[in-house]
Image (spheres, rainbow, N blue to C red):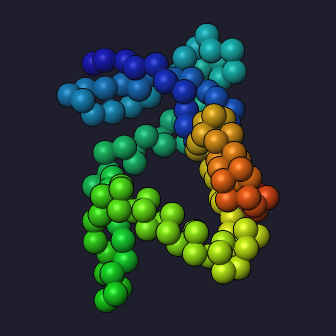
Amino acid sequence: MRKVLTTCGYCGTGCNFYLNVEDNEIVGVTPKNDHPISKGKLCVKGWQGHSFVHHKDRLKKPLMRQSDGSFSEVSWETAYSYIGSKLKKIIKEKGSEAVGVLSSARCTNEENYLMVKFARSVLRTNNIDHCARL
Ligand code: SF4
């Protein structure tokens, strides 16, 4: 079994643990006893939160709703292009305050920083919030 040191991605506390990996699959977690924050302790999300990694329902590619209501897999380029065109259209018709951004506690600080920059500098809106307040 291989042990891979990582930082928990579920909240901003930043607990560390080892992912126990067998045959390229995560089979469990071992806390890092000498980590200054977690000190060998984890909440239930740290212990069990890895199950999504190999889950069969995990979304790995963008899906786009079709006219009949079904979803079809599309490329990232297609998805981003569609999102960009819709945001431009809304801002042109309704102004920047008509759009907003929701970020996530599961993003890194750097990703959340970029989200703020994107909202304020690109979209020109202060409408940005975070899942911890939802
Ligand atoms: S183990 Fe729990 S408290 Fe620690 S970072 Fe993960 S979610 Fe947060």
Q: What x and y, as percent, mark residue 121? A: 71, 50
Q: What x and y, as percent, mark residue 25? A: 27, 34
Going 37% across and 18% down the picture, which residue do you hit? 3
Q: What x and y, as percent, mark residue 23? A: 20, 28
Quarter of the image where the C terminus is located: bottom right
Asked if residue 110 lies left or right of residue 17, the reply is right
Going 43% across and 40% down the picture, which residue do you hit? 50
Residue 132 in view in this figure: no
Nearest the eye: 57 or 112: 112
Nearest the eye: 126 or 8: 126
Q: Give the vertical position of 134 relative to 34 (above or below).
A: below
Asked if residue 52 lies left or right of residue 112, the reply is left
Going 24% across and 29% down the picture, which residue do you hit? 24
Query: Residue 133 sits in which quadrant?
Result: bottom right
Residue placed furthest toward the left = 23
Q: Give the vertical position of 19 relative to 61 (above or below).
A: above
